[in-house]
Amino acid sequence: MSDVDILRRLTSIESSDDTYTDTVLQTYISTAGGVNAAAAQIWGEKAASLAELTDVAEGNSRRSLGKLYEQALKMASYYGDLAAGPGPAARRGTKVRPIERA
């Protein structure tokens, strides 16, 4: 599976999408610095396109369209964190101290 195919799966982009072609996705991967960073960028774009949606209630029907925006932001953050790698706490390692008796 190619990086472009992986990016499509991570961002729920169909291969028939006219906006995110294989060439465009490959450019995202190259400029962002990897598949996870590209996924974070694309999810951020998706969030921007969903920002104007609001919750709708008509009669007994209710649609929480604002949740789509929130979820896209969470996905952007998730893949951004993956792209950044482990934080300082994960890189520190384990500290071992001798036992002291009082």
Image (cartoon, rainbow, N blue to C red):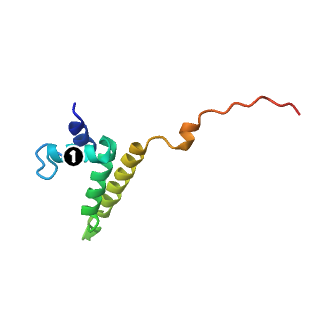
Residue found at the very far front of the displayed protein: 31
> Could you tell me which quadrant the N terminus lies in?
top left
Residue 40 vertical position relative to residue 34 in the rendered view, above or below: below
Total marks in image: 1
Examine the image and state in which quarter residue 63 appears: bottom left
Q: Position of residue 50 (x, y in %)?
A: 26, 62
Q: Position of residue 21 (x, y in %)?
A: 14, 46
Q: Which of the 4 quarters of the picture holds residue 4?
A: top left
Where the C terminus falls, by quadrant?
A: top right
> In the image, what residue type sits under mark 1?
Thr
Residue 78, image x and y in percent? 39, 48
Residue under numbered circle 1: 27
Element type at mark 1: helix
- At a point 23% along the width and 46% down the height, the residue shown is 12
Residue 17 shown left or right of residue 83 in the figure: left
Relative to 68, is 83 on the left or the right? Answer: right
Residue depicted at 28% across the width and 68% down the height: 54
Query: Residue 27: x, y in percent?
Result: 21, 46
In front here: 3 or 52? 3
Considering every residue shown, the one lying at the far right of the view is: 102
Nearest the viewer among 28 and 100 is 28
The foreground one among 77 and 38 is 38
